[in-house]
Image: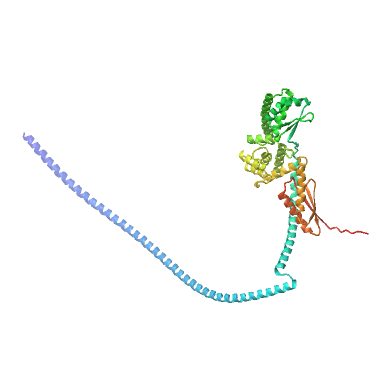
């Protein structure tokens, strides 16, 4: 028991001693740490103060620099202001001096103007006196003399102008005529096309006159059925072995001719058979029209045509213009246009296309009150042809303004094809009327005594009186007549105007 107590006392005493030792050591260490922390804090404090001083000095330096710069700028601005004030003062002084000089000049000008007005009045009086003196000497008033002078100047100027025009024309002919003739002649020589002549009637030949009775039928039933089915007037008269088919539509005449040929060959002629044959042949001719259009486009190397345009081209085979087959004429114009365009460095395919389509307005039967060129242009626009082609179609008779270089080529080639000898046949009355119009148009000019249209209207000889028309006036007269014919008349090719002025001296020996 005592040992236990002694053990406990020893344990307690050991614990107390340990606590005392621990407490002493802890306090000693804490005091050391505090001192070290205070020393470190002092170091940090001094470091921060040094950094703050450096930053303050830097800011102070920058501020002083900014202040110096601002002061410098203010000094410069003050100097500029002083310079401007000095310049303004000089300008004001200069303006004052100029104002004084202007006042002085104004006074001098006023004096000079007064003197000039007085001199002008004196000159007008002197001029008036001279005019009165000249009028008294010449016996003419000033207005009459002025009129005579103006007329004299007009006559002289007109003569010089005509001489100048002739020189320009001659020079242009020398430089351009040779090349133009070469191109046109080469173009014509490279195209050889047969010319077909069509009429408004077709003559159907039969073997004997007995067939006429069968064609007419009992009480005329067969011929009436044939006329009703084809739309063609069938004339059966006393002409031996011939029946005349009359219609303005060549396609209908062709259908009627083929129908008569098949009916006569077959021998069965009655209304039902006639209607059957005509319907069959109408489809056949329509197919042939399309085939002709396609073949024409292939022959000319033209692609991309609208099917309706192809059908119109095929119908040209059965149309004629002034006795010239329309399809052959269009093919000829297409070839001529392509060759001429290639010679001039233009697009030959586009020119050939425009040349082929230039007369498509003659085929449709609608809108007859419009010119065929305008109708053709509308058709080309409707079927999406290029603007150059549409303009060439519409402008080949000058109905619309030419806007492309293809248009005059098509116009020229159309004239070449139509003006070629044998290409077209004119009605005699129209031909004579055109010759009379040529002669009467030239005869209306003053000084013209006689006119003669020669060479089928290709040349107009104009005889003038030598006492009324001078040589200079003759040149002017030929130009005026040519201009008037060009503006007022329609003619193929060109018309040459020759003015003849001669002086005759006549005496009689008795």
Residue at (67% x, 36% y) in the render: 313
Q: Quadrant of residue 471?
A: bottom right
Residue at (71% x, 30% y) in the render: 256
Instruction: Look at the image and tell me in which quarter the C terminus lies.
Output: bottom right
Q: Position of residue 107 (x, y in %)?
A: 56, 76
Q: Position of residue 124 (x, y in %)?
A: 66, 74
The colour scheme used here is rainbow
Q: Name, please, the residue furthest toward the front.
A: 219
Foreground pick, 475 / 104? 475
Q: Name, please, the residue furthest toward the right.
A: 510
Q: Quadrant of residue 325?
A: top right
Image vertical order of residue 425 relative to residue 170, above or below: above
Q: Position of residue 6 (x, y in %)?
A: 8, 37
Q: Position of residue 19 (x, y in %)?
A: 14, 43
Q: How many marks?
A: 0
The answer to whether residue 185 is visible is no
The answer to whether residue 63 is visible is yes
Image vertical order of residue 276 relative to residue 146, above or below: above
Foreground pick, 94 / 37? 94
Instruction: Look at the image and tell me in which quarter the N terminus lies.
Output: top left
């Amino acid at each position: 028991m005592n040992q236990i107590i002694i053990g406990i006392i020893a344990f307690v005493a050991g614990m107390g001693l340990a606590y005392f030792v621990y407490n002493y050591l802890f306090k000693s260490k804490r005091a050391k740490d505090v001192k070290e922390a205070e020393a470190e804090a002092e170091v940090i404090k001094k470091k921060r103060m040094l950094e703050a001083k450096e930053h303050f000095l830097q800011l102070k330096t920058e501020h002083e620099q900014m202040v110096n710069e601002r002061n410098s700028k203010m000094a410069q601005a003050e100097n500029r202001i002083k310079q401007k004030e000095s310049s303004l003062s000089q300008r004001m002084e200069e303006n004052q001096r100029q104002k004084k000089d202007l006042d002085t000049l104004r006074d001098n000008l006023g004096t000079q103007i007064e003197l000039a007005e007085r001199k002008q009045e004196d000159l007008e009086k002197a001029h008036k006196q001279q005019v009165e003196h000249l009028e008294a000497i010449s016996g003419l008033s000033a207005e009459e003399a002025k009129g005579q002078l103006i007329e004299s100047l007009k006559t002289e100027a007109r003569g010089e102008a005509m001489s100048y025009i002739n020189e320009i024309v001659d020079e242009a002919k020398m430089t351009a005529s040779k090349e133009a003739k070469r191109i046109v002649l080469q173009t014509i020589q490279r195209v050889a096309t047969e010319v077909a002549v069509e009429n408004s009637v077709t003559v159907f030949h039969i073997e004997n006159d007995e067939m006429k009775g069968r064609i007419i039928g009992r009480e005329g039933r067969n011929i009436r059925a044939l006329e009703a089915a084809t739309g063609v007037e069938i004339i059966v008269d006393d002409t031996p072995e011939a029946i005349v088919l009359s219609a303005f539509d060549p396609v209908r005449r062709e259908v009627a001719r083929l129908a008569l040929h098949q009916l006569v060959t077959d021998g069965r002629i009655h209304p039902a058979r006639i209607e059957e044959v005509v319907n069959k042949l109408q489809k056949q001719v329509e197919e042939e029209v399309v085939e002709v259009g396609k073949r024409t486009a292939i022959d000319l190397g033209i692609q991309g045509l609208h099917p309706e345009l192809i059908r119109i081209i095929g119908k040209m085979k059965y149309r004629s213009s002034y006795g010239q087959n329309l399809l052959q004429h269009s093919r000829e114009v297409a070839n001529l246009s392509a060759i001429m365009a290639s010679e001039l460095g233009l697009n030959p395919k586009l020119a050939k296309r425009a040349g082929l389509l230039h007369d498509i307005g003659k085929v449709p039967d609608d809108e007859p009150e419009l010119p065929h060129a305008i109708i053709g242009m509308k058709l080309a626009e409707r079927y999406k042809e290029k603007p150059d082609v549409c303009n060439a179609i519409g402008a080949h008779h000058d109905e619309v303004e030419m806007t492309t270089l293809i248009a005059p080529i098509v116009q020229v080639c159309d004239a070449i094809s139509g003006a070629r000898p044998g290409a077209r046949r004119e009605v005699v009355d129209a031909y004579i009327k055109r010759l009379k119009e040529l002669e009467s148009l030239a005869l209306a000019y003053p000084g013209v005594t006689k006119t003669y249209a020669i060479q089928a209207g290709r040349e107009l000889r104009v005889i003038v009186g030598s006492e009324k028309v001078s040589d200079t006036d003759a040149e002017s007269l030929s130009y005026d007549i040519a201009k008037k014919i060009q503006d007022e008349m329609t003619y193929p090719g060109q018309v040459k105007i020759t003015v003849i002025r001669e002086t005759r001296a006549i005496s009689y020996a008795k």
